[in-house]
Image (spheres, helix red, strand yellow):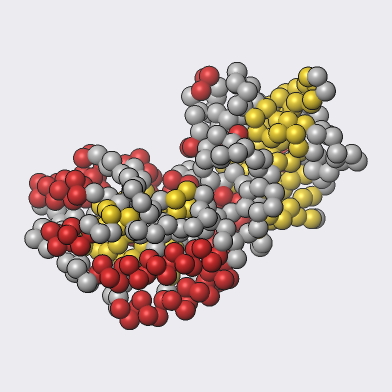
Amino acid sequence: MTAIRHTAPLAFQIHDNQLMIGGFSAERLAARVGQTPFYAYDRDLITARIAQLRAALPSAIQLHYAIKANPMPAVVQHLAQLIDGFDVASGGELKTVLDTPMSPLNISFAGPAKNKTELTQAIAAGIVINLESERELRIVTEIGAALCIQPRVAVRVNPNFELKSSGMKMSGGAKQFGIDAERVPFVLTEMRALNLEFVGFHIFSGSQNLRAEAISEAQEQTLALAVRLAQNAPAPLRSLNLGGGFGIPYFPGEQPLDLTAVGERLAELLPAAQRELPDAEFVIELGRFLVGEAGVYLCRVIERKWSRGQLFLVTDGGLHQHLAASGNFGQVIRKNYPVVVANRIHAANESELASVVGPLCTPLDLLADKMPLGHAQEGDLIAVLQSGAYGLSASPTAFLGHPTAIEVLVN
């Protein structure tokens, strides 16, 4: 049995020329699911990623999962046994995590434009609300008074620095996220007179970063900023969410994040911060890094079609179910995800190029562009790797009325 390596120590195995997912061959898993397309998430690979993080990061670091990366209930339930907390971004996500064994004390709610209903749900549940604006501060105070509950709150800070080289920059400059750092001392002073339980700060700088030095630099700046802002806090800091930003490689030439380097530098930085903030727990919040590499999207070839010298593999899957792989979810210049013929990994001649397209009436419905997949035949399974995060829930599933893909957690 060999393996497809993508980020050590994680690997999907290959056996009898088929991709293995959670102990099942691609064809057997498709038979078990009963239809294509579908997403499959490997339970053991998720568990291995958590173990990898625990080994690399200082023991004092708490791991939280941002469930927007993959809100499938079975995945969230599995993670609830392995991590220390959840971060949600909507009332719907809140319902999902409240169905797990995770204590509400370890659940937080971030995101702009939280509505009054969502805030009421969050206060009643007893979770931490990361305040994104002074409007939210006012509304949360009013709801707490109406319910006779003291809301648990943290301040989400928009720092004046960014996570360099990140796929999405969430801080620095003008942003819809959080309260500008220079305004935070005034908000903290105002909070002293309000009936709120102040918990700490949430400082999230960016996402999808593969450079250890950039992540470490942002963490150093985050710790320093939190120490400064804590001087105006209405109570001792009990939680500091450092954000995350840990990326996974998707495209040719990308190298995995050096997690050891991140952990070693954080171990150097943490003691000074612990002295300054002796009551605080330090949290790293990750989404994609926990689940992204553990997921595969599988669809079936309906037709091999030639058009003016170019081979197309027309499948029953497409951008309506996997928008990110089509290049229409954050890519500036479209690049191919890693894609394989799942039931025919190797062939005598793998040099023939083919493009994988879906059933939608748009040229944007492209899952792989001129990749060495020409050995695929009608009826074969195409697997898009690195599909465990921002897949089905980040796609326009209602587009053209095709059925929604199934999701399964395997093994």
User: Which residue: 40% across, 80% down?
Assistant: 271
The reply to whether residue 405 is visible in this rendering is: no
* Left or right of 224 in this view: 290: right
Hey, which quadrant is residue 312 in on the image? top right
* Nearest the eye: 243 or 161: 161
Q: Position of residue 112 (x, y in %)?
A: 31, 44
- Residue 41 screen position, x and y as percent: 59, 47
Confirm whether residue 398 shows in the render: yes
Residue in the picture at 74% in, 27% down? 313
Above or below, 125 against 299 in this view is below
Image-based side of 298 in relation to 209, left or right = right
Q: How many marks?
A: 0
Question: In the rendered image, which quarter is residue 347 located in?
Answer: top right
Residue at x-position 52% and y-position 19% = 401
Residue occupying image coordinates x 43% and y 76%: 269
Q: Position of residue 260 (x, y in %)?
A: 58, 71
Residue reaching furthest to the right: 348
Q: Is residue 21 left or right of residue 144?
A: right
Observer-nearest of 238 and 218? 218
Find residue 108 and report its horizontal and vertical position in percent. Answer: 32, 54
Would you identify the image quadrant in which residue 308 lies? Answer: top right
Where the N terminus falls, by quadrant? bottom right
Of residues 311 and 54, which is closer to you in this image?
A: 311
